[in-house]
Image: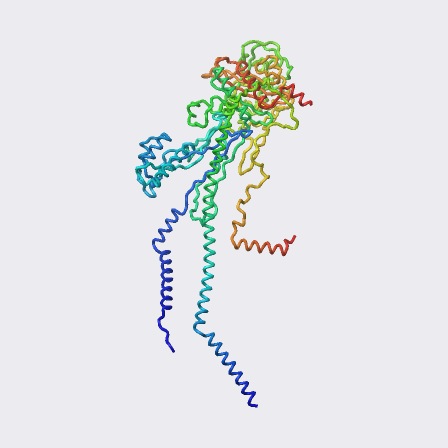
Amino acid sequence: MAEPRDRANKRKEKAEKRMRLVQAFKQAPWRIHARYVGLFLLTLVVVLVVASIYLSISGMAANAGLDAYRLDLKRLDLEREIAHRKATLALITSAPAMEERALSMGFEKIAPEDALYLTVPGYTGRGTMVVAPPPGINDSSRQLVRSIYRESLWDWLFTGINSLGSGILGDGS
Amino acid sequence: MKKKGFTRYHFLGIFLSAFAIVIAVQMVRIQTSTHAEYLDDWAKDYGYELRTIESERGYIYDRYGHLLAGNKEVYEVGIELQFVRNPATIASTLADVLKLDYQKVFEAAQTEYVPGKQVYITLTDFVQANQVRNLSELKTQYENNNPYGDNPELPSLRGLTWTAHLQRIYPEGNLAANILGFFTYYDREGGAGYFGVEEKYNTLLAGVKRNVMIPLDPYEMQEIPTAPAGASLVLTIDREIQRTVEEILDNAVKNNGAAGGTIIVMNPNNGEIMAMASNPRLDPNAYWENTTVFPAGVPYNKAVNQVYEPGSIFKILTMAAALDAGVVTPETPFTDTGQIEVGGWTIYNWDRGAWGNQNMIGCMQHSLNVCLSWVATQLGPTQFYDYLDRFGIGHRTNIDLAGEEVYPLSVPGDPMWYTVNLATNSFGQGVAVTPVQLLMAASSIANEGQMVAPHVLKSYIQDGQQFDTTPQVVGIPITADTAKTLTDMLAISLEEEASDALVEGYRVAGKTGTAEIAVNGQYSSNKTNASFVGWGPIDDPQFIVFVWLEKPSSSIWGSVVAAPVFRDVVQEIVVLMNLPPDEIRISMKED
């Protein structure tokens, strides 16, 4: 009867020994240091990731702001240039300039009695100036900048959730 | 047990912690120190740019899109004192390229730079683009040879700057100047439109002008305010007709020794003014000559800014009223004894002669004052003045041109009205109108009794959309039958008289007018206003033309000086309007 008890005690001692060993391993100073270092490095990585994202976004925002400023100046330049070219074109095609050019090319002014009138089917005469559509054809008051460029992350998130919700629930109609 | 000592790890930890604390303390200190306040103020001063946002002034086009008023690029030239390296180069270059005074520029370029107080000096403005291109090329060349202007022995234009802005320009010169008016572009702060559509539609053309703060911090630059351009106007004017009419008017004024004149061409169906010439005219590009071209008493646009006694041309209104009221018909007989007494005053014909038996056509053909005075008495003052009121006499037409004049019409009951006025008014004396007012009244005869509002704005373009104006009928003073009857009477009158107003191939109706001008309360027989109003083709009027020559010296009679001008105008405009002669037009319709 003594043999089985010894065997059991031995097994127990062996288990206790293993437990002490594990405990000693877990409580080893280098292991605690390694854990702290790991936690610190993890925090550092998180901070660095957040900081780099922030820097990147800030850089892009600053760049976009400077682009907007530069483009606005460019727009003003272009508007002035368009106006100037229109004026130059008008000077070149002004009535006295056109008459002078026509005369130099050998054209002569028609005498009223020399006019020959022909019926051109479908021709309704010279149309008056139309450079823009009448009201109602287009809506120029619409936002030029799409909403995606104007809304914040939260706006975008809530809009998405709302649209998802209405898609699932339906609009009730 | 081995006791741990003060290790190098502890030292490093303390050092880094202390460093972090120092940084934190410094951050707090920066935020709360007196320097922080200074930095805040500095940011407020330099963190924003004050920019004047000014709309580009709207364009003005003729009905077919020819630019009559636009904007061109010009430059303000100045010196940024901080960067000046060689004042002598700046002075000699500007003296050479821009013809500026060397000494003045040299002194300006030598001005001491005082930060925040004395940083920039304007030298000149409205410099043309090609001149600035020359300056730019020189500046680049000098900069390449002498980078940063470091060598004082070499030329340098550092510090010389130019800023672009727009200047009003009228590419057609003085064409339609009386309609356009002008914009005082030299006054960059308070420039405004004067006369014509530039004044009438100044607010619409100008758009907006405001000062805004533009953030220089790129994070705050979310949306840069802009100012939409002023509205552009499309006029009813046809450039070719306008030019032709102006040429004819200028020649007529010159050949007849007139003091001035005006010609208006209008579509009687919708009131669109196709041409409105006035003599003298100003080149609006040089608007400062305004006071020279128009000395005191000379209006900018005689068609709307001046009233005059129309004389016999006014008889068409008297006859229209009488026909419409049923008082007379074209065949109503009248025996002209050469005089008639009204209100105790004797009225005579223009030649003081007696024209015997006439009908109403003869009365109009020979322009008999006595006959028309009789017609007015048959109408009676109530009906006569009621009709004049319906024709818009004594009221503004509200044409969309600045400064329209009006002369009040004296009616029975007014202190200045006497019974004889009924007679004198019937042939256009004692009553004053503007040419456009008379034209509007006459348009009712040419347009089946419907009187249309004369206007020069066909449409306007604003915010990318084109808004058309709607023609307006402002009254129906007479019936369509009356209008047709009178038109036929006037056409017959011209034909029987073999008038100089007749145009080969086109049947037209019209009436001459010769009005003596009152000088010091007395009518002068050698100073007259010669005028003519006519329209055609009479079966489907497409134009109504008004001619007025002021104080012609070649002849005092409207039939001699104004009627041929009408013919010249019609001969030209029918070609420009693609209006074939009646015979061809009617045959085309039948086909």
Tell me residue B113's x, y (percent).
Answer: 32, 41
In the depicted view, which residue is nearer to us: B330 or B182? B182
Q: Is residue B368 visible?
A: yes
Q: Is residue B197 above or below residue B40?
A: above
In the depicted view, which residue is nearer to us: B391 or A169? A169
Q: Is residue B440 above or below residue A138?
A: above
Image quarter where the N terminus of chain B lies is bottom left
Q: Residue B269 falls in which quadrant of the image?
A: top right
In the depicted view, which residue is nearer to us: B56 or A85? A85
Left or right side of B560 for B186:
left
In this view, which residue lies farthest toward the bottom? A1
Q: Is residue B195 visible?
A: no
Tell me residue B234's x, y (percent).
Answer: 54, 31
In the depicted view, which residue is nearer to us: B135 or B405? B135
**Type of colouring:** rainbow
Q: Residue B4 falls in which quadrant of the image?
A: bottom left
Image quarter where the C terminus of chain B lies is top right
Residue plotted at (51% across, 19% down): B249
In this view, which residue lies farthest toward the right? B591
Tell me residue B24's x, y (percent).
Answer: 38, 60
Disc tally is 0
Tell me residue A2's x, y (percent).
Answer: 55, 90
